[in-house]
Image (cartoon, rainbow, N blue to C red):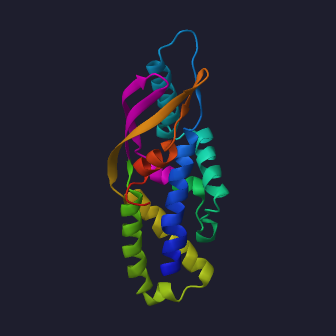
Amino acid sequence: MGTVKTTAGKGALFALAIAVAALLLTGLTACGGEAPEDIIRKGVTEELESIKNLDQAALDEIVAGAASSGTDFEEYGISMDDFARTWLSGFDYTVDSVTVNGEDATATVTVTCKSLMEGVNIWLEKATEAASDPAIASLPTDELNKKIGSLLLESIGAAPTETNTVDLPYVLNGNTWEPGPGFDTALSQAFAAGAI
């Protein structure tokens, strides 16, 4: 089970958190005299709302981002889309404030989602228990992997939510507010605190 923990555990969680963060790495272009605070708030809200609503386009981007890092649950009989949907069900957020100081800005965002680390801990307990069952331990590899995948999805679904607040840096580049240095790290940590 140790190699499963490494493969389907922290590496996958890190890749998913980074993929979610990448969804928000788009620039926000100023238009028609809108205040920078409003532009940033609107852009962050639109992206986080697509995650909250489990929009297929947003999920496709998250899955593609995770897949580009080599993350895959296929051998465990579950799709990355199903995993992401299970993890992000119950996701919520607030854009608490946006502060602009010249060409730098900070959006303070509070993110609530299922704890990936707690989900993995639940899964490890269930997998350890299953491994002690001779009927499960004697399953052919393919069936055993599917059982492991089923337990992983069930465990992530049962994980408690956690709430994390993060400051997202933005910088003005010409007429566009872009994520600043450390943006993706800060956001991915908010989504997967304790897992990475």
Quadrant of res 107: top left
Question: In the rendered view, does 14 fall on the left or right side of 176?
Answer: left
User: What is the number of callouts on the image?
Assistant: 0
Q: Is residue 84 visible?
A: no
Q: Which residue is at 60% across, 67% downward?
A: 77
Residue 113's place in the image compared with 32, above or below, is: below
**Residue shown at 46% from the left, 36% from the top:** 169
In the depicted view, which residue is nearer to us: 176 or 10? 176
> Residue 51 location in percent, x, y?
50, 40
The residue lying at 62 percent from left, 63 percent from top is 72
Q: Is residue 20 left or right of residue 118?
A: right
Above/below status of 131 relative to 124: below
Q: Residue furthest front?
A: 102
The residue furthest top is 33
Across and down, in percent, residue 178 comes to: 56, 31
The vertical placement of 56 against 40, above or below, is: below
In magenta segment, residue 87: yes
| Res. 54 visible in picture | yes
Q: Position of residue 42 (x, y in %)?
A: 48, 24
Q: Which residues are magenta?
A: 85-112
In this orientation, which residue lies closer to the viewer: 121 or 177?
177
Q: Position of residue 103 (x, y in %)?
A: 50, 24
Q: Is residue 6 magenta?
A: no
User: In the rendered image, which quarter contains the C terminus?
Assistant: bottom left
Q: Give the prevailing secondary structure in the magenta stretch.
A: strand
Q: Going 52% across and 34% down the picture, which residue do you hit?
A: 47
